[in-house]
Amino acid sequence: MDKDIEELRGLLPAPVSADLTADRHRLLKEHLMQEITEPAVARRQRRRLAVALVAAAAVAGLATVGAVMGLRDEPARAPVVALPSATATTTKPGLPDTPLGQFATQVALVASQSDLTVGKDQYLYVKSRVAFRNGEGRDKDLGLDPLHDREIWLPGDAKKKALVKENGHTEEFSVGQTNEQRFAGLPTDPHRLLEKIYKDTAGTGHGREEAAFDQIHYYLVEALPPSPELLAALYQAAALIPGVEKVDAVDAIGRHGVALALHDKFDGSRSEWIFNPKTFAYLGERSVQVESKDGRKAGGINSTTAVLEVAVVDKAGQSK
């Protein structure tokens, strides 16, 4: 198992850097604080034009405790790991026997193999490469900011400060709740889980399906579900949402993958969670503008991310 997990780790090029403007730095700080503390409906109003946080939990499921993902030159060529078939019963059953259902089941099976834990005196460390739309004007599409690195340290103890670094800027913030509190009451059966999420998000967001997809994203974004069973169930629940589809996608550093995606008809964008099509390892995410709306042209990229490293470390600021 350890060998298989090692083989799933991504292979990435060396980092690049770019400077943040004062306005972007302010936006980063405001969005990060609100992403941690606000309900889904408030986050939804800003997410498409704000910084896209990385869904690190999926990658955390591929890393052993205390290990760091190695950086290599050709991550898309990671060896294929023998996984159970899409009809295996090691995760909760119930997804339809469709290409989407089979793909989501394989993603869930990989997630269910996670043994990563973060102790009270430790931090979940995530390094990613990100870019997002430059400017928020409704009448202009200024394209993406330059790709740049982002690092975050999330404490196992909610009383301790979290830390984020982006292009030379460093911010500390309070997470506000323990990991257990964030995921309290969530069942590991994907059907029951989706029903609860529908109930919790009723009347919010851009619609029933979009609000549920966004809420699942909130549970996965730079966080660690308390059990691999819940992590797997979150992906399965996402695949059960009407309108979610399987699409080809490319992450922020050019790795081609397959994504769980949902088209938001309100703002014309499509959210994509991208996975390696052979190993089902999480690669990153992006938001694509599929309809021209509010000054954003169809085909444009609103945000894009790629996960570079994941580790459990002993102190904030530590990468290995």
Image: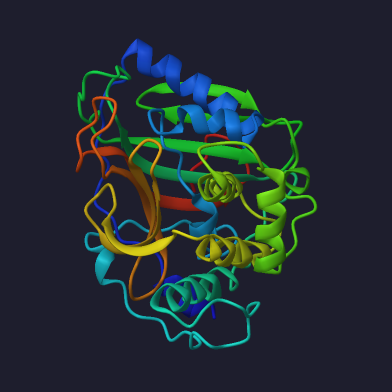
Residue in the picture at 51% in, 87% down: 84
Total numbered labels = 0
Image quadrant holding the N terminus, namely: bottom right
Q: Nearer the viewer, residue 51 or 99?
A: 99
Specify whether 21 is left or right of 193: left
Q: Position of residue 88 (x, y in %)?
A: 57, 88
What's the image's color scheme?
A: rainbow
Q: Position of residue 215 (x, y in %)?
A: 59, 45
Q: Position of residue 275 (x, y in %)?
A: 38, 63
Residue 306, can we see it? no
Q: Nearer the viewer, residue 245 or 242?
A: 242
Q: Position of residue 26 (x, y in %)?
A: 44, 14
The answer to which quarter of the image holds residue 294 is top left
Residue 28, can we see it? yes
- In the image, is residue 7 above or below residue 149? below
Specify whether 255 is left or right of 228: left
- In the image, is residue 42 above or below residue 225? above
Residue in the picture at 21% in, 39% down: 300
Considering every residue shown, the one lying at the far top of the view is: 22
Q: Nearer the viewer, residue 293 or 78?
A: 293
Residue in the picture at 35% in, 26% down: 167
- In the image, is residue 67 above or below residue 169? below
The answer to which quarter of the image holds residue 194 is bottom right
Q: Nearer the viewer, residue 246 or 306?
A: 246
